[in-house]
Amino acid sequence: MQSLRANEALTHPGSLLAPDGRVIAPFDLEQRDAEIGEHVALASQPDILNAAAQPFELDYSNLNVAHVINGMGVTLGDSIVGLSALAAIRHVYPQMRFVVYRPELAPPYVEQLYALAAGKVAQTRSLPWPLASIPADETRIDLGNHLFWPGFMSLPMIDFFLGALGVRAERIASSHKANRWLQALELPHLPEAWRNQPYVLFCPAASTPIRSIPHRVHATLVERLSERFDLPVLGFGPVDHPRYIDVASASANTAHFLAWVKHARYVLTSDTAAVHIAAGFDIPSTAFFTTVAPELRVRDYPRCLPVTLNLPELRNVQASDRQQDMLRLNAAYDTALKAELPFSPRRATLASTALNQP
């Protein structure tokens, strides 16, 4: 069986198997920044399903447990949507139990989401994990390194995850593709000062600069929010504006972040986790999209109003902080902010009404 070269291992569309028989996440190899030894593709092993290597379809009505190996990525947004795919399957087939094997070095704030989902959507285990300890007589699905799968940037994300799990996406109702499993989570209370105080939320930061809202326009966007809703604007980092309040110190972990989004009147964000969270809690939002077409991310979010920036030369770029790309990004925002931004008119009315209630 042919071993993968170091560069092949890191970008391989699937998980890896080490010579000692343990399943390895390519992400963990990259994070350790050490010499990469010999590995083979996990999908080369018997009874490992990997839709990137060979598409498949499962009859979940005849299954009770499935092991999802190296799912659902190392970003918060991907994980929310990936878990939504599992929740949607469990809604149709409530007997199903999922075990998700996670990269060992995934960011702690992402792993906090899986801890919240434990017992509600999936059980988790940490890689590396001996392949021999994943029962061969149970369904074993490799979803590793999905960023490098051909369909990830050409399909709506929820449809991609469903297909990778062996489900035809059209068989799942759109209402079950909007992350509403988040509503079942046990979240902390907001600080007392904000429990009955309406506010709108500004979430500009994504996992890569090319999808984040540039700092230079933060104050302008806070002003737009303040004018539109006549409410305090909260966020997670400094912005120089008199109606903006930084609540980062009261958002110690992912559960607190989810709670802030849950109780917001409106969310202004980019192509990042906040837009998926807002949809899960039925909070209306406006979201900027730079390198990804919005229909691939928010198609099933009826209360999200997307703004697509004119950046055709950066379409499908996964991540970037290159100077030339940042200059293009800044110019695109300058152009976009010359026009009116799309805000939900219904929510503006609700916000004003709530503000005037005793």
Image (tube, grey):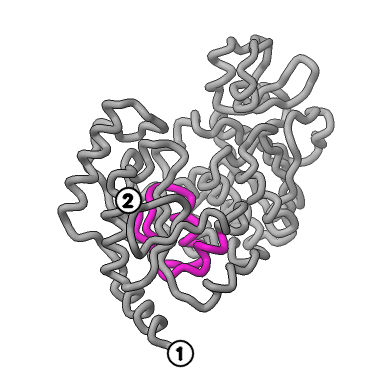
Which residue shows up at 55% across the image and 35% down it?
A: 55
Q: Give how far across and how far down residue 321 sits, in percent.
A: 37, 29
| Residue at the image point whose x is 51% and y is 47% from the top | 77
Q: Position of residue 190 (x, y in %)?
A: 58, 68
> Hey, what amino acid is under mark 1?
Pro
Looking at the rendering, the stretch of residues picked out in magenta corresponds to 258-287
Q: Is residue 278 visible?
A: yes
In which quadrant of the rendered view does residue 228 lie?
A: bottom left
Local SS, label 1: loop
When the figure is inspected, residue 78 is found, relative to residue 229, above or below; the finding is: above
- Tell whether position 162 is magenta: no
Q: Which of the labelled discs sits on residue 236, or is there none?
A: none
Residues at marks 2 and 1 touching, judged by CB atoms closer than 8 Å: no
Q: Residue at x 57, y 54 (%)?
A: 84
Instruction: Name which quarter of the figure residue 135 lies in.
Output: top right
Q: Residues within 10 Å of mark 2 (few under 14, many from 20)?
A: some
Picture residue at 62% right of the left edge, 52% below the top: 253
The answer to which of marks 2 and 1 sits earlier in the sequence is 2
Q: Is residue 208 left or right of residue 84?
A: left
Instruction: Decide which of 286, 133 is in the foreground and name it.
Output: 286
Q: Which residue position is annotated with label 2?
A: 218
Distance between the alpha carbons at the discs numbered 2 and 1: 32 Å
* In-front residue for pair 314/186: 186
Residue 358 is tagged as 1
Q: Secondary structure at mark 2?
A: helix
Q: Residue furthest bottom?
A: 358
Q: Does the magenta-highlighted stretch encompass residue 267?
A: yes
In this view, the residue in front, 320 or 47, is: 320
* Amino acid, disc 2: His
Marker count (numbered): 2
Compare residues 292 and 17 and report the one nearer the observer: 292
